[in-house]
């Protein structure tokens, strides 16, 4: 029986016989990329692409310095620091097999709350060519109803008052770009990898809005020198479970405090607009295009919205994982009808793509019983997700007097879900920046369903649509009286 091997740089040689490890000399890899937000998705996606590129051996300029930005990121920082940036990527195949490898592309890690100066200097370093971000949909700090940057956010106000000790990505980027300008360092690329349509444009708009107050003299320089390419990212990456860590230890004799699990599918479509060079990610499977928008709409309004659909409905019914939800025949049919009848008619710019096959693949991916993606993860921060994933479909369909019954049903389900109890009387775990406000509106909706739509930060003026209001209140009443599954049957027979 082989002893357990703790994952770190020193022990890579011991692991070569049992698992794929980096083939390159990590000490010679330059950190040309600084990534803010080194969570599971970044490590299953962008860091994987970079590792593949580094393994090809012809370009060692694209190692990653991972920045843990927030106080609660201390655990991932400490883990990666202890493991020299290394972690195990576990790809869970549909047949239950594990395909594993050690990823080595994160060659440096920094904890922003511990050393703000080091992070700012790293962002400003001339060797840093690209700054990438996974800060979640809510991290862009703008009002969904107006599209304007939220300057009143207390953390933003802190950064304005304490520019050398920032707490937000906007404060860090502003100070770093200011140093680049003052030191005559070439500008860099800032690339969002979040599920936000037009994420590059959104990043540019929000950053410049912040700079308009923080460093107005910097705005024109950034407009002229910094590029903000949009990208579409895709790989289902559930939260790592204790059972995954234990199986890795028992079956593969590897001690890794925070491996990453993911599905086999992976996709990255990137707008080819970089200020100072870029990696040849196309050599390892990424796709560079002139216009990302059609791909973004496809993914956000089918995959991401679809995830929210089966997540919210499944959570209220009492399911714990996405595969349980989507393998329920009624929910699977609901999801298929939603994709076919409400989303597909408004998608365009996808000439040559087999949309039917893509939708079929989504159901297969959601139903992967080895992934066990928790509905609590999918339902977290729903107030930030629905405006980006579902509202564009509703608005477009309303503009053309199209079908919105299923979308309305999802929002009605969310209103009832937001009361915090599922149909079995079990307490739901709700994680949302707007949790208190949402719950207050959910309680009011018990007396008047329409009051839930007063969440203007999420819904804007949606309540003014008679067509939507009617569909929403009908769905709310049906779900309240009969439960989700019986209400779906009623909806089909309507």
Image: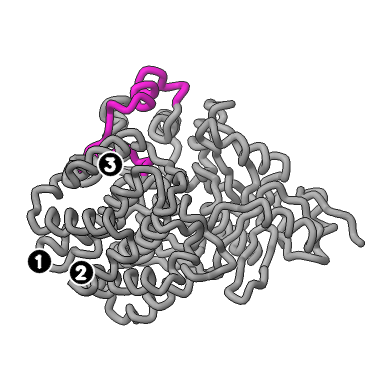
| Left or right of 441 on screen, residue 61 | right
Please give the range of residues in magenta.
Answer: 138-166
Badge 1 or badge 2: first in the primary sequence: 2
Point out the residue furthest to the top here.
Answer: 161
Main SS of residues in magenta: loop
Badge 3 or badge 1: first in the primary sequence: 1
Disc number placed over residue 400 in the picture, else none = 1
Location of mark 3 (residue): 442
Position of residue 37 measured from the top left corner of the image (x, y, whole percent): 50, 43
Location of mark 2 (residue): 346
Q: Nearer the viewer, residue 409 or 236?
A: 409
Badge 2 or badge 3: first in the primary sequence: 2
Q: Is residue 154 magenta?
A: yes
Q: Residues within 10 Å of mark 2 (few under 14, many from 20)?
A: some
Task: Classify 330 as above or below 23.
Answer: below
Q: Residues within 10 Å of mark 1 (few under 14, many from 20)?
A: few
Whether residue 349 can be seen here:
yes
| Element carrying mark 2 | helix
| Left or right of 108 on screen, residue 179 | left
């Amino acid at each position: 029986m082989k002893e357990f091997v703790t994952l770190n740089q020193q022990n890579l040689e011991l692991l070569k016989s049992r698992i794929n490890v980096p083939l390159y000399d990590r000490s010679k890899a330059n950190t040309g990329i600084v990534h803010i937000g080194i969570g599971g998705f970044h490590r299953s996606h962008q860091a994987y692409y970079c590792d593949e590129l580094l393994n090809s051996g012809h370009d060692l300029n694209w190692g990653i310095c991972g920045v843990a930005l927030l106080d609660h990121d201390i655990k991932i920082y400490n883990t990666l620091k202890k493991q020299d940036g290394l972690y195990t990527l576990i790809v869970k195949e549909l047949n239950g097999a594990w395909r594993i490898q050690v990823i080595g592309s994160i060659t440096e890690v920094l904890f922003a709350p511990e050393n703000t100066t080091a992070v700012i200097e790293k962002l400003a370093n001339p060797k840093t060519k690209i700054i990438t971000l996974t800060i979640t949909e809510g991290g862009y700090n703008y009002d969904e109803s107006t599209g304007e940057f939220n300057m009143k956010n207390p953390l933003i106000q802190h950064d304005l008052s304490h520019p050398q000790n920032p707490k937000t990505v906007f404060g860090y980027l502003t100070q770093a770009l200011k140093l680049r300008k003052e030191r005559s360092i070439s500008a860099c690329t800032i690339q969002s990898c979040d599920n936000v349509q037009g994420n590059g444009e959104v990043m540019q708009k929000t950053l410049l809005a912040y700079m308009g107050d923080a460093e107005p003299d910097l705005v024109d320089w950034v407009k002229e020198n910094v590029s903000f390419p949009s990208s579409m990212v895709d790989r289902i990456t559930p939260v790592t479970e204790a059972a995954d860590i234990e199986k890795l230890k028992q079956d593969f004799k590897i001690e890794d405090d925070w491996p990453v699990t993911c599905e086999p599918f992976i996709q990255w479509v990137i707008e080819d607009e970089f200020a100072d060079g870029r990696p040849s990610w196309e050599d390892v499977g990424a796709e560079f295009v002139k216009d990302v928008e059609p791909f973004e709409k496809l993914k956000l309004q089918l995959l991401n919205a679809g995830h929210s659909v089966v997540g919210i409905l499944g959570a209220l019914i009492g399911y714990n994982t996405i595969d349980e939800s989507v393998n329920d025949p009624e929910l699977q049919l609901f999801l298929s009808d939603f994709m076919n009848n409400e989303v597909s008619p408004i998608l365009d710019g996808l000439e040559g793509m087999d949309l039917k096959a893509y939708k079929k693949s989504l159901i297969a991916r959601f139903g992967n019983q080895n992934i066990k993606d928790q509905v609590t993860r999918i339902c977290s921060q729903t107030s930030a997700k629905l405006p980006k994933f579902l509202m564009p479909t509703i608005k477009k369909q309303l503009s053309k007097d199209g079908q919105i019954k299923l979308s309305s049903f999802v929002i009605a389900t969310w209103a009832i879900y937001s009361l915090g109890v599922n149909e079995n009387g079990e307490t739901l775990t709700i994680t949302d920046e707007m949790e208190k406000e949402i719950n207050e509106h959910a309680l009011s909706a018990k007396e008047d369903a329409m009051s839930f739509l007063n969440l203007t930060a999420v819904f804007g003026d949606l309540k003014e649509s008679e067509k939507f209001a009617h569909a929403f209140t009908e769905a709310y009443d049906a779900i309240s009286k009969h439960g989700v599954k019986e209400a779906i049957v009623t909806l089909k027979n309507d």
